[in-house]
Amino acid sequence: MEPGLVEKEDNNVAPSLMQGQIAYLYKNKAFGIWNNFVLASIFLAVFWNHLPSQKMSLLIWYGLILTLSIVRFLMGKNFKINRQYTQDELSYWANRHVFFTTLLSTIWGIAGIMFFPQDLIHQVLLAFILSSVLLAAIPTLAASRLAFYFQIIVILLPTISLLLLSEEEGHGLMAFAIIILGITLILISTYIYHLLFELQTTHIALQALADTDQLTDIANRRHFDRKFKVEWRRAMRDQNPISMMMIDVDYFKKYNDSYGHQEGDKCLQAIAKAMGSITNRPADLSARYGGEEFAILLPATSQENAAMLAERLRKKIENLNIQHERSSFGVVTVSIGVSCCEPAWDFTGKTPDEDQKVVFPAMLLTAADNALYVSKEQGRNQVSEQGCGDQKLSEALQKNANADLTAA
């Protein structure tokens, strides 16, 4: 099975749906090892006395089945069910499972050639065991429907071919019965695949509803925090910068007091819509962070470019000309804080160079929040930047503000 099969078949599957499919696949990974152990043991017991001259071959075959089953199980232990993976990572895990499952299926198919029985009773037993192997491989549908169809061909075709080539009476009928079995498995697996897909699609739709802010129809804070973790890991792996904006609506409480909460809701909706103009890439994410505060995540974006986008957003919102009489600007405006980090660690556990700072996700969030504080303190309706981990300017402003409060 070629490594890219899952990606070619499922390249239009949403990452959230693919996450559910692969998580389902690995959740019951212990079932695969026990199934192969039991069926291979039954096969060994059935043919041990029937093929006395091939006992050593049976033992070697049995050892290969168990070894590959254990290896597949151990390789799957590193998959974290509750962790959010990128689509590339999910494709990697799906292809890995398909690869080992295909190897196991090939060995099972070889058994139909090496240990092909001549009597009808043992042929029926062989067909029964092979069909049980295919039934147990149905979870492969979660990774790829084509992969499961391939398992059917690899396991059944060798036995069918020998039966068709044989001139013994009844072998042709037996081959026809196995062909009917294979077609039935394809039809059943197709139904199961579509049922699984529909159930997971419904689950994803409910999940999207839970991750969406109902007022502004953009991501809520819960979804933003989860996506932030995923994109941070991606930035570590690819050694790319990741930028963030923290956005606060200026004098929004006064706006609500003057125009009412209904107009306030419309104002937030208009701002959320304007944010869509700078989040055009699939990985970009805008979210309502809380109240009148918003956040934008910009993976693979430098601080310079993020600041340019922030200024574009600030002007766009100002140009909406939403009247605000109690604002010194006369219209609704926003203050924006921008920061950018370059994660120093990667998935391999590689440590940074001696002159490279260790960077954590909280540092990006803190820097963007501090930059927002600077924008508000310096008069609002502006964009401020702060380097990741650089908090001196904001700390100085905070101390001045605290001193003013103490003096008052």
Image: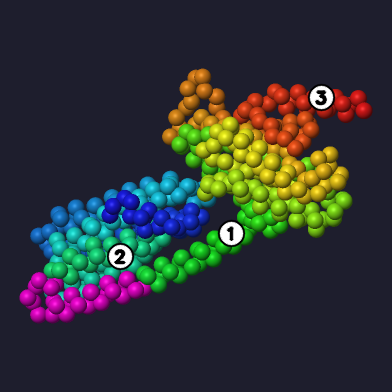
Q: Which residue is mark 2?
A: 149
Q: Which residue is mark 3?
A: 400
- The amino acid at mark 3 is Asn
Residue density around tag 3, few if under 14, some if 14–19, many if 20 or more, within 10 Å: few
Nearer mark to the viewer, of 2 and 3: 3
Query: Outermost residue toward the left?
Result: 167
Whether label 2 touches label 3, CB < 8 Å: no
Quadrant containing the C terminus in the rendered view = top right
Residue 81 colored in magenta in the image: no
Where disc 2 sits, the SS reads: helix
Front residue (pair 87, 36):
87
* Quarter of the image where one finds residue 127: bottom left
Label 1 to label 2: alpha-carbon separation = 31 Å
Residue 186 colored in magenta in the image: yes
Q: Earlier in the sequence, mark 2 or mark 3?
A: 2
Q: Is residue 293 visible?
A: no
Provide the residue span drawn in magenta: 163-188
Label 2 to label 3: alpha-carbon separation = 70 Å
Q: Earlier in the sequence, mark 3 or mark 1?
A: 1
- The amino acid at mark 1 is Gln
Q: Which residue is mark 1?
A: 207
Q: What's the magenta bit mostly, secondary-structure-wise?
A: helix
- The amino acid at mark 2 is Tyr
Whether label 3 touches label 1, CB < 8 Å: no
